[in-house]
Amino acid sequence: MVGTAHTVLPLTSVAAAGAVRIASMRATHDAAPAVVAPAPVVAMDPVHAIDRARSLSRAGSLAPLDGLRRLGDVAASRAMSRRTVIALAAAAFVAPVAMAVAQPAPRTHFLVVGDWGTGSKQQAAVAKAMCVSNAATPARFVMTVGDNFYSPDGVATDANFYTPMACLLAQSVKWRATWGNHDLGGNDVSRVLGSKKRWFTYVDGNTRFISLDGNQPTSSAQRAFLARTLKAATEPVKVIAMHQPLYTAGLHSPSYKARTAWLPLFKKYKVSLVLQGHNHDYERITTGGITYITTGGGGAALYPCVRSQPGLVMCKPVNHFLEVDSSPTGIAVRAVGTDGQTIDRVTVPAPAGRASTRASVVGRR
């Protein structure tokens, strides 16, 4: 049995790999024989023979081919078959070097909440459910889709932040906050939640995240930033966070200006998921090959679903947050109610493209 960094492969696979390794070592040995005094032959069972050969090889007191011959001597004393000898040799000399199995690709687990900082009982209930989720599976960060602080707008107070979100603050969560229209009255999205700029990007695992400012949809600087960031991104999964929705069935109409400015870039560079707020409900829409999820049920008064929208899968006025797991193969999203029950669940596949080897968070703010 090998160490925890390796996986024991089937006997036939090990034998085949071992045969290649043996041939290579034999060629090397014939060209430059090792001058090493042979160790005495001690009859032992196969497992102990493997362990002994490994330890001697690592210590430099046994040339590789001599180790194989020693196993042959053990085999003769035990009348083992030729196939067993090959398998034992491969396990002893190949597995520690060449049989390591690749670890699973990194995934990014995070939570999402929107339209939340009102100081309401509903905000506290959503926050409590998020704390339970985060305690069970710690999130890399909490993403928001805007309208983080109400009454007064843009200002974090005991009533709208420090008291209702106390359990999350005690868990030392990291915030990745998007700016909403109610955040413009103050600067606490920057000062308290850490979003120093209105639009920014970061990488976590194999996912490129881009937070946009829906309050400035016609900004040429913001569009240039978006185009430049998407063009340079090598990550297989791209997620956009914004406040005003591009598509919606809710009370507020969609942001047609943002749709005109940004949607062509989303399509061109294969954005997988757009997370949005502004309408105080839960919605899932798939149109043009992109999934749009409105997650505006974080604590503000709920809005009805009032408009027809092609591609609409669900629209429900309900308090909730999202659990999201992003990996190179796609994004799993679960909408969770204040009772911890599932409201909706979907897996958004990653588009075909280049995989990234980046595994650390890189912020550009």
Image (tube, rainbow, N blue to C red):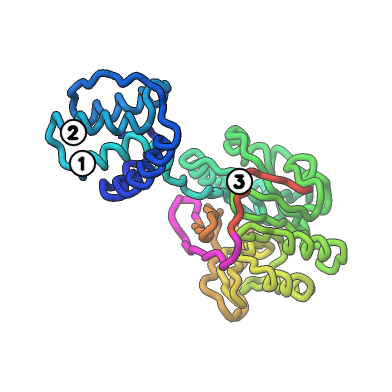
Q: Which residue is mark 3?
A: 359
The kind of secondary structure element at disc 3 is loop
Which of label 1 and label 3 is nearer to you? 1
Tell me, yes or no, whether the two marked residues, 1 and 3, touch with CB atoms within 8 Å: no
Please name whichever residue, 98 or 319, is drawn nearer the observer in this view of the structure: 98
The kind of secondary structure element at disc 2 is helix
- Quick one: label 1 or label 2, which is nearer the N terminus? 2
Q: Residue at x 30, y 27 (%)?
A: 51
The kind of secondary structure element at disc 1 is helix
Tell me where residue 56 sits by quadrant: top left
Q: Is residue 216 shown to the viewer in this render? A: no
- Residue 280 left/right relative to 196: left
- Quick one: label 3 or label 2, which is nearer the N terminus? 2
- Residue 338: in magenta span: yes
- Residue 245: in magenta span: no
Where residue 100 sits: x, y (%)?
A: 42, 42
- Amino acid at dot 3: Ala
- Residue 360 left/right relative to 21: right
Tell me where residue 341 sits by quadrant: bottom left
Q: Which label was assigned to residue 84?
A: 1
Please name whichever residue, 358 or 55, is drawn nearer the observer in this view of the structure: 55
Tell me, yes or no, whether the two marked residues, 1 and 2, touch with CB atoms within 8 Å: yes
- Quick one: label 1 or label 3, which is nearer the N terminus? 1
Q: Which residues are magenta?
A: 336-354
Q: In the picture shown, does residue 356 fall above or below 127?
A: below
Where residue 119 sits: x, y (%)?
A: 66, 46
Which of label 1 and label 2 is nearer to you? 2
Q: Which label was assigned to residue 334?
A: none
Q: Which residue is mark 2?
A: 75
Which of label 3 and label 2 is nearer to you? 2
